[in-house]
Amino acid sequence: MQFQTPLVPATLIRRYKRFLADCTLDDGREVTAHCANPGSMMGLAEPGFRVWLEPNDDPKKKLKFGLRLVEPAEGVLVGVDTSVPNRALRAALEAGAVPGLGGYEQVRAEVKYGQNSRIDFLLTGGGQPDIYVEVKSVTLSREAGIAEFPDSVTTRGLKHLEELSSMTAAGHRAVMLYLVQRTDCRAMRLASDIDPAYAAGFAKARSAGVEVMVLGCDLSPAAITPGEALPFTD
């Protein structure tokens, strides 16, 4: 997925009210960027970090910049916009480029299902069972090379696991897909200490037949592209 506008570098001053980030552009101007991330952004919101902003000239938007990437260490990029994974994955799914999720004729997004929920992607056709795919963005890393989810308590994430389990009970395939938006991680695990309830719900969902997939990302200031499959570690 190409960014609509080339990203510009800046320095993070502070992230606050969850969805706002004050930054200093390289020319010295201070701007406020929209931060599309409801999580804690643990380890990624330190003042002084190098960040990458996407400018926009949309008159309907109050903020003229969006925070897209954080560089917590030299050469390490982390995608912090949680809306990006679904946009990037849709193109890959439609092209049949996601291992294990190819051969479907139709890819639909935000389809109503379960108890007042919407699935990120519903794949149908091609003579295969329908498959429900829920996507989560993974940005936390507290140990070198290991990504973790979640970075804060997520009751919504727990509900999604329960909804996926109901789909397997109905005879469908269901996949919990974690997209690791970091260039420095080669495996993923649950942050069970941060949200024990989510970890318990995850174990229950796997027992019910929910499949787990982890994908890495190719990240740059120009684009974000789903990458190779990564191992999930218990």
Image (cartoon, grey):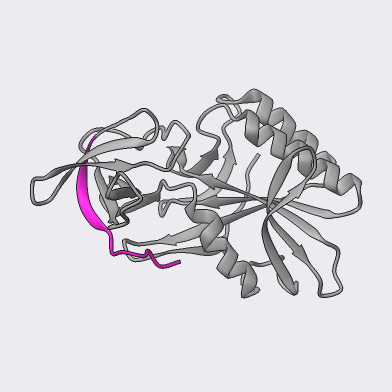
Please state the extent of the stretch shown in magenta in the rendering: 1-13
Q: Position of residue 103 (x, y in %)?
A: 75, 74
Residue at x-position 37% and y-position 64%? 3
Q: Position of residue 26 (x, y in %)?
A: 12, 51
Instruction: Please state which of residues 226 and 110 is positioned toward the viewer in this rendering.
Output: 110
Query: Above or below — where is 195 with respect to 123?
Result: above
Q: Left or right: where does residue 142 sit relative to residue 74?
A: right
Q: Left or right: where does residue 177 sit relative to residue 33?
A: right
Q: Left or right: where does residue 63 sit relative to residue 195?
A: left
Residue 173 in view: yes
Q: Position of residue 92 (x, y in %)?
A: 58, 69
Instruction: Please state which of residues 32 and 14 is positioned toward the viewer in this rendering.
Output: 32
Q: Position of residue 225 (x, y in %)?
A: 47, 65
Instruction: Please state which of residues 21 and 207 is positioned toward the viewer in this rendering.
Output: 21
Q: Is residue 193 magenta?
A: no
Residue 206 in view: no
Residue at x-position 85% and y-position 69%? 128
Residue at x-position 50% and y-position 43%? 147
Q: Where, quadrant-wise, is the N terminus in this rendering?
A: bottom left
